[in-house]
Image: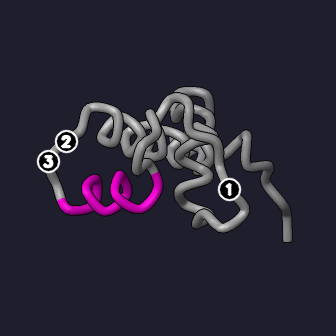
Amino acid sequence: MKMIAWDRVCMPKVKAGLGLQKAEAINKAFQCKLAWKVISKEENIWVHVMRTKYLKQHNFLSCLPKSTDSPIWKSILKS
C-alpha cells in the first residue's frame, strides 16, 4: 500500500491534492471563536458557565490556566 503525506492531501485540487483543510488549523479557528465569545460576553449558556466557573473576578486576557482547569478551557486560553 502506498502512503500519501498529509501535506499532499491538504494541497488544493489544482495542485493534485484533495483540497482538505488541516485539522490543526480548523481546531485553532474554533478555539479562537470560543475565546472571542467569552471576551465579547456573548449571551449564551456556554459562555455564562465558562465565565462563572473559570473567570469569576478575572479578565479573560489576564487569566492563567490552572492544573485543575479542563483541557478545553486550557486550550482556549492558549489560543
CB under 8 Å between callouts 1 and 2?
Answer: no
Residue at the location (62% across, 34% down)? 11
Reply yes or no: does residue 46 show up in magenta.
yes
Q: Main secondary structure of the magenta part?
A: helix
Q: Secondary structure at mark 3?
A: loop
- Residue to which mark 1 is pinned: 66
- Residue to which mark 2 is pinned: 42
Residue at the location (53% across, 56% down)? 73
Q: Residues in magenta?
A: 45-54
Residue at the location (54% across, 41% down)? 28
- The amino acid marked with disc number 2 is Glu
For marks 1 and 3, the one nearer the N-term is: 3
Coloring basis for residues: one colour
Reply yes or no: does residue 19 show up in magenta.
no
CB under 8 Å between callouts 1 and 3?
Answer: no
Residue 17 shows in this picture: no
- The amino acid marked with disc number 1 is Lys
Residue 68 picture location, percent across and down = 66, 67
Pick the quarter of the image with the C terminus: top right
Q: Secondary structure at mark 1?
A: loop
CB under 8 Å between callouts 2 and 3?
Answer: yes
- Residue to which mark 3 is pinned: 43
